[in-house]
Image (cartoon, rainbow, N blue to C red):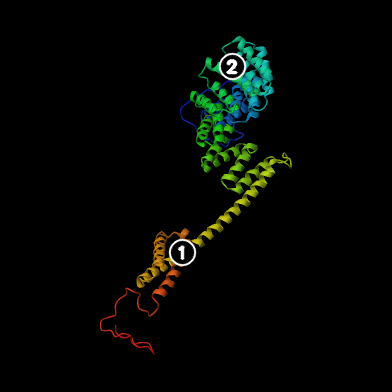
Amino acid sequence: MLRTIPLVLLLALVGCGPKKPVTEVVDPNAVVNPKQAFGEGVSALQGANYTLALSKFEAATNADATYVKGWFNAGFAAASSGDYDKAERYYRKALELKADHTGALFNLGDVLTKNGKATDAVALYSGYVEAHPDDLAAKNNLTDALSTAKMYDDAIATAQDVLGRDPKNVGAYRNLSRVYSEMGNFAMSQLCAEKAKSLNDADPGIWNNMGVTSLAQENEAKAIENFRTAIKLDPTNLEANLNLGYLALDSGDFGLAKSSFEAVVKKAPDNVDGQLGYAIALRGSKDLAGAEKVYAALLTRDPKNRTVVFNAATFYEKYAKDFKQAGKVLADYQNAMSGQLSPSDELYSRIDRVKKSQQEEEARIAEAKRREEEEKERIRRAELLLKEMGDAVAAMEKDLAACPGVDPMVQELVMMTIEQAKPVIADKDTQMASDMKTFVDDAKTQLEAARAAACPAGAAPAEGGAAPAEGTPAPAPAEGASNPAPQ
């Protein structure tokens, strides 16, 4: 359980909601009132504008280098904006001016732990614990730092020392749960978490630890349940929201991920992990404009953040299909890291990948256009076939009416073909046009042959046709023939 000290607030909190970032042009020659600058910094913190707050606290300490509260709040603002190097310097300055400033000490230890300097945090907390052996909260902080530094045996020993003095110390059990989980001893991790829960089941940190342990055991359903419980107890809990958000991303539940990361960025706007997860969730939810806005802000804030750069480049390459922008993101990073990258750095393969993706996309678009033109031509030809079919069907119907003595089998075939062709023509079914035209042409050919046999040009209609008009003379006999004798 980490003990961190909140910033010093001189002004009452007001419910004005988040304020928009403010940009000011400061005259370097102007005389700065440190207390006024400090107050303005506090106001900026109330609006979660950590960048402006930091500049105000820096102005206050520049005007008065002995301003302990200014250095402390500058450290808080820097840590809140993710600039742990500055935060470390400012907290150390506060401690230099006031050695017994426990707030600066604990916050410095937290910053060191988060900034990959867990062993430095261990040394810092150890010195304090030696001087204050009864401060169990400090020992819990030391346990956390030892765990982060992977000094697990010392972490367990420190936590057990806390429990020896206070058998119901929830923080110690929670820390032990984390230590055992990182060691892969999930049974002990779960046991410690259950013990902590029995002492205080309203502690969101316990449920978060249980979620992490469940996730390590590949029990995602249980992990989600535990993270949800932690968030229910504390909707703004950063760790639980981050864990649930990234778990949701892995499972493709972008709606859940979006709501989880929204809680993170609302509480900690400068949390890079939260903002990056939020961008991915927006991207997965098809809100490309929203995702692009987040990526742009992250790149502006920290152009050297490799994870952000590669993620943003992938967004432009794979999702927005803006290869020019993807290349620019990578080129800007290359310039920012000038002289610091080896020839085999992944950046160069990324640049090549973007170029290849662009070529593939251009080829895909060209092929799609070719197919589109090909489809248009097919439809044009099909429409011509439909018109020809319509004419052919009309002609066959006319021929059947003019020559009813056509072979009944051919007549049935033609009528069936006409019956099948008419819906195709009426619906303008270009997909069926070609196949149907083949059947129509075949039926037409057979009808023409059958009609020629049944109703040759100039021949009398087939049997059953109209009788000769009354008084019409019989045809003359052919040459050399004689009229038959009456019967």
Q: Is residue 389 above or below residue 284?
A: below
Answer yes or no: is residue 104 visible: no
Left or right: 343 as drawn, with respect to 445: right
**Helix, strand or loop at mark 1:** helix
Left or right: 201 as drawn, with respect to 141: left
Q: Amino acid at mark 2?
A: Tyr
Q: Amino acid at mark 1?
A: Phe
Answer yes or no: is residue 474 visible: yes
**Pointer 2 residue:** 173
Q: Is residue 75 above or below residue 162?
A: below
In this rendering, the label closer to the viewer, 2 or 1: 1
Quadrant the N terminus occupies: top right
Q: Nearer the viewer, residue 229 or 145?
A: 229
Q: Nearer the viewer, residue 473 or 68?
A: 473
Q: Earlier in the sequence, mark 2 or mark 1?
A: 2
Quadrant the C terminus occupies: bottom left
Left or right: 147 as drawn, with respect to 471: right
The x, y position of residue 185, in whole percent, is 63, 21
The x, y position of residue 426, in whole percent, is 39, 61
* Tags 2 and 1 touching, CB below 8 Å: no
Q: Residue at x 67, y 40 (%)?
A: 336
Q: Residues within 10 Å of mark 2 (few under 14, many from 20)?
A: many
**Pointer 1 residue:** 439
